[in-house]
Amino acid sequence: MALHEGNDVLGALLMRESLDHCVKCTICETFCPVSNVTPLFGGPKYSGPQAERFRIEDEPSSDSSVNYCSGCGICTQVCPQGVHIAEINTQAKAKYGATHGVPLRDRILARPTLAGRLGTPVAPLANWTLRNRLLRLAAERMIGIDHRAPMPRFAGRTFQRWARRHTPRRANRRVAFFHGCGTNYYEPRLGAMTVALLEHNGVAVEVPKQDCCGLPLQSNGLFDDARGYAHRLAARLAPFAREGVDIVGTSTSCTLMLKREALEILGMEDDADLRVVSGRVFDICEYLVAMHKRGELKTDFQPVPETVVYHAPCQQQGHGIGEPALDLFALVPELRVVESDADCCGIAGTYGLKREKYDIAMRVGAPLFAKIADTAPDRAVCDSETCRWQIEHATGVRTAHPVEVLHRASGLD
Amino acid sequence: MSHHDVVVVGTGLAGLTAAVRLAEAGARVLVVAKGIGSTHLSPGTIDVLGYAPARVERPGEALGALVEAQPAHPYRLVGAQGMGAAIGWFKDRVANGSLAPYAYTGGLEENLLLPTAIGVPRPSAVVPETMAAGDLRDGGPVCVVGFRALKDFHPALLADNLGRSRIGAGARAAELDLVPERRTDVNALGFARALDDPAFRGEVIAQLAARLRPDERVAFPAVLGIADPHGAWAALEHGLGRPVFEVPTLPPSVPGMRMFAILREALRRAGGAVVLNNVVTGAEQAGGRVTALRTRVGLRDERRGADWVVLATGGFASGGLELDSRWTARETALGLPVTGVPSPGEERFRPDYFGDHPMGRAGVAVDRELRPVDAAGERVLENVLVAGATLAGAEPWREKSGDGLSLATGHRAAELVLDASTPAAGAPAAAARS
């Protein structure tokens, strides 16, 4: 049975009901990157469709092992029966958190805008703090953020500030840019490159005021707060969607949140703003490929004589759009692309930052790190910011968003 | 909307075979699927024809006779020759694939007789090299080795049943207490990963060597490596100094996963792409041809343009076919006509489980070029080809023919598309096919 009839989202309740389609084939378990490296997580089938039958409403949730699910979503991808395994497990984590409380550490990690606002004005100090071994050890001891875990660098100036000073190009087609927290606080350069690339291709870019999409809160089981963020962001973006303006994002997990996760996992199907935004959100590479199909992409790319390892992050796979970055890279002369052929880098947003999960995350990513080490590329390429930080941390190889490669190929560097 | 030369629907053996062969011939291929296909659940052998209805010893000969006797059987679409070509192609892909030197052995000349996990002899034509020494026709005693922590494989049950079978291979069981990483619960894949590690292989050999009797060959659950199966199997044969063979387990099936990995990697190397979580909900048509498939991705509908469509979505078990409570059968992706469904009042099922169930042969009927046809035998779509378990007229679970049918019709579907797209014989695409 289809969970969605026409364009109607039948809702979070039916996400859960999909467990009745599970035939215990174990295909999800063979793909789960976490349960394959640690016995602490029982696996997606066990924690999802099986254990869910014992998570009875109004009764306390007792099995903490579901908290070891990283939420990468691969299980839902590979399920041949259409069971929404990852969604069920994310809901189960929230239920566990509601029963037993969510640790302070998770509440902090789940609010990237809070960290961004605090850290940006004092970026040099904040960056020094995040890289000071003694302070990191203290933080690990006090709140449980692993002292080795990769931390981004505050840029000191936000992308929003750059965008306010940028004179937009006028063009026939326009998009709204959903840049996300990573671009705003840590990688404003990526935002500027995205604007330049779109403008280069005749697209005017508007940068609406925006805040977090709520994904980290959702992943950490803080559903009420996540709904608040998703609702406020949708309200900011909805006017564009209602005008027929597409919303383009560079953070592939955050665009997935707006596309469907907030509707499906948080049960926000009654949020009219979110519904209209959901229908208009595109991953940047998905959007550029669509432009190319319409003959709107400038393809007079300059040679980029580099070898890159491309890793499609799990959340990008969740879009169900294939690997559009590879289609774009195929247009760039002299670019040699090696596919990672690995499932997951391990970080899964905030998962790999946590003391009890850091080693698991590194083991999950080991095949990817080995592939990168073997290839010795000029750089690695990945669509998701936290994955890029993890890959750089584990391999020492500079890791870029696909837009950065296209920016260079378009002669915009 | 994307556009590809060929969109293949389904990631089972039939779909992947068609996709790899087309991509290797230069076609731009996209595989769309709801999820991972049946490979992970299958033993990883290519069973061509096991029973017809008596046990088949020479599948090539029996296949010819079957097609004569059953003109509606899908094997008529490929014949023994097409089956042989497909087997040759498949063995070559494996031998030159990502897990080489892991290879398959066997062919249409004779069936091997391999034990199942419960010790039932199963006729199989083409098998992983790691299973071949299990041929029960060879006689001689077998030591069935299990791992206590692998709860899906019971060596005593296997050995007992094997001893009882008329094949007469004497068998006994031995259990090892080795557990990878001291886990409490390990599935077949967990053991396969452990056996990729030479150190774990060494522990197995050390615990087992003294317990074996001189003339015994050794059966293991099919967990002898996932990244390096040839290495694991060869190391055990060498270390134990005797033939070693794998017996398929309950799912997850490690040999099936190897098969998937090899074909998936071959497709990647040939430039083909796979997107999952794409449920085909219908097609746009013009002039008897499909111009684009509609797929549901999350909350959205995508259109995927194609010159050709290979439909390999499986049968009732995989959701390629559906039967509702009103006894109406439908093909779920494109709504193709389904034939062979007994009319109201007619018998649908027989009382015994392995009986000749009339319902069992329901599916999509096709013409000689694998195009779907309606009740009158008229072709309904020009550029759609159907392969694998969706096809009407076979009873794979009784015949032990499912893998053979999927491989041969997937292989044939690719050939038909290439023939139809090649302007003249002898063109480069024809060379690439050989």
Image (tube, coloured by chain):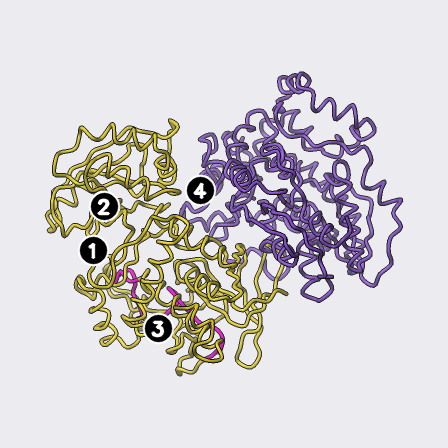
Disc 4 is placed on an element classified as helix
Marks 3 & 1, CB-CB < 8 Å contact: no
Q: Is residue A322 magenta?
A: no
* Circle on res. B112: 1
Name the spot of residue B368 as percent of width and height, x first.
Answer: 37, 78
Name the spot of residue A76 as percent of width and height, x first.
Answer: 52, 48
Give the mark, 1 or 2, whose residue is nearer the N terminus. Answer: 1
Q: Colour of chain B?
A: yellow
Q: Which residues are magenta?
A: B380-401
Residue A65 in view in this figure: yes
Amino acid carrying label 4: it is Glu
Q: Which residue is mark 3?
A: B340
Residue A220 in view in this figure: no
B210 relative to B133, above or below: above
Amino acid carrying label 3: it is Gly
Same chain under badges 3 and 2? The reply is yes
Q: Which residue is mark 4?
A: A29
Q: Residues within 10 Å of mark 4 (few under 14, many from 20)?
A: many
Disc 3 is placed on an element classified as loop
B314 relative to B132, above or below: below
Question: In the picture provided, is A92 more to the left or to the right than A31?
Answer: right
Label 2 marks which chain's residue?
B
